[in-house]
Image (tube, grey):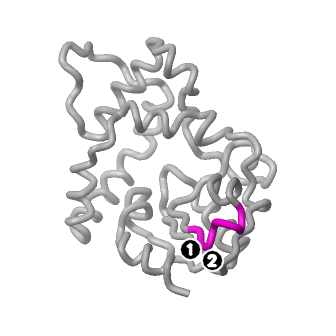
Amino acid sequence: MAVAQHYGPARVLAMGLRVPYFGLPLSTELGLPDGQLRFPTTDELRGNSLEVQRWRYAMTDMFGLPHEPGTVALDYPEAVQTLMAANAEPAAKTHAALIRDYPDTAQAMANNSISVDASMYMMARDVALDLPGLDPRNIEHSGNTVVVWYAADDEDCPPSHGEWLAKHFRAKTRIFDGYGHLGGGLIDHPLFLEALTTR
């Protein structure tokens, strides 16, 4: 959405959104749940405080990656502990369903090569959640194709955001159920690209 808003209709022919999510200020304005953890900001990540190190340790575990040599075990941040406790049972069920029904997708996820630090910067609060000025109501594009896929049982990005965007853009929509956030974000990606490039 940020790319589409920045470059506008002169360069944006279509827009594809998977498990899309509004920044927190806009969520509040539209009366939608923010639903997301308050990730550290870019400056906080650069400062590498103990709390950031806790986030890094927790995300390394969540991504199933090995810790760097010499890393000392740290407690997860309180926000992560709360989320994991609340979602432990549904997350286990949706992950098991993903492995059962989409083993290739699950394996591709396991082979993820994006580093934890890169992921943390991509999800930094000032970049992913509080980015000022980003508003889908200001987005224009020269084509007529918008694709919005999201999960009805998404435990990370509230499905109400995907629903709002699908209606707003009169998008080609697919709603997953039973596979959680990862299913909505990863299942049938070739079909997603096909929908995006088919008029």
- Name the outermost residue toward the front: 10
Q: Nearer the viewer, residue 112 or 72?
A: 112
Query: What percent of the width, then of the height, locates residue 95?
Result: 30, 57
Residue under numbered circle 2 = 171
Residue 12 higher or lower than 27, as above or below: below
- The residue beneath circle 1 is 147
Mark 1 residue type? Val
Res. 38 image quadrant: top right
Determine whether 54 is above or below 117 in the image.
above
The residue segment tinted magenta is 8-15
Considering the whole magenta stretch, tell me its main secondary structure.
loop
Residue under the point 64% across and 52% down: 2
Q: Earlier in the sequence, mark 1 or mark 2?
A: 1
- What kind of element bears circle 1? strand
Query: From the viewer's perspective, is residue 119 above or below residue 51?
Result: below
* Residue 132 in picture, x, y percent from top left: 74, 40
